Amino acid sequence: MMVAMQGRRGDTILVNGAVNPLAAVPNRLVRLRLVNASNARIYELSFSDRRSFHWIGTEGGLLEHAVALEAITLAPGQRAELLVDFTDGRSASLVTAADTNSSMMGGMGMMGRGARRTDAAAPATVLRFEPRPLGQARASGVVPTLLASRTGPDASKAVRRRRLSLNMGMGGMMGSGSGGGGLTINGKPFDMNRIDETVKLGSTEIWEVSGEMMRHPIHIHGVHFDVLTRGGGQPDVLDQGPRDTVLVKEPVELLIRFDQPAKSAPFMYHCHILEHEDNGMMGQFSVA
């Protein structure tokens, strides 16, 4: 079942375009594919009855092993695959906690103009589930121990380290998007005529990414990466797997292998908050 959560940071959440949706599901193990298609809202998802579930996949595919959770964070652009057991036949709702991600000045950059501050300040129901019998009663399926074998990039073969800082100066808070302290990466607003980074095809690199004032979902085109460290320590539980989007505020080290060429048409990297990327928090890199 595919679930696309949409909306800015307003008072209405849409799922696959529907308001207050109800999903009829079989009373057994159900696979959910979630994508956060919202402009800016970060969802802190759990079930209303606190039932646990298994997280099995990210933007880049299956995890090696299923992870038992009671809650999962999904930032704009992130995807997750879950296995949820509805064998007990009880109704339940997928709910989200309040979105508290905002700058120290209490705004959301470009979203501050005309947006109500009560928009995402309360918990909300995302999707209601109604289990229904499907044929003969059956026991819940077994979650496999091993989901997928995967060999990630080798950190010892990294040939270069790059640092990206997602900046929010006063200009960005006022919505200018014109640089000079606005919404930028490494102090530079996006310029489609400028290549910010040049990468060698087939190389492995470490990119250290950090964000100012609030959490930013950094998205890198053309690759999947592994999270090496977060804030100088071990990655979080939710940093696992092959990713293309990850939340940053404290410095996060990403291990990336560049296997897709991009010479005449560069790839982009950007904050996945729509109003941030559209107003300068984006860069370009070539791979050749």
Image (cartoon, rainbow, N blue to C red):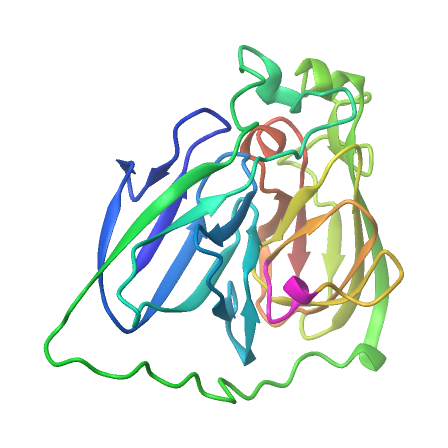
Q: Nearer the viewer, residue 214 or 204?
A: 214
State the image quarter where residue 221 is shown.
Answer: bottom right
Q: Is 129 on the left or on the right of 188, as rendered?
A: left
Name the residue: 53% across, 28% down. Answer: 120
Q: Position of residue 162 (x, y in %)?
A: 83, 56
Q: Nearer the viewer, residue 89 or 104?
A: 89
State the image quarter where residue 28 is shown.
Answer: bottom left
Name the residue: 57% across, 30% down. Answer: 278
Vertical side of 273 occupied by 209: above or below: below
Q: Nearer the viewer, residue 190 or 35?
A: 35
Q: Quadrant of the N terminus?
A: bottom left
Q: Position of residue 248 (x, y in %)?
A: 73, 48
Residue at the top extreme? 114
Magenta-drawn segment: 237-244
Q: Position of residue 196 (x, y in %)?
A: 74, 45
Residue 288 can be seen, yes or no: no
Residue 50 can be seen, yes or no: yes
Q: Is residue 240 magenta?
A: yes
Q: Quadrant of the C terminus?
A: bottom right
Q: Is residue 253 magenta?
A: no
Vertical side of 282 occupied by 25: above or below: below
Q: Position of residue 35 (x, y in %)?
A: 43, 52
Q: How many marks?
A: 0
Name the residue: 55% across, 41% down. Answer: 97
Q: Give the main secondary structure of the magenta stretch.
A: loop
Residue at the right extreme? 232
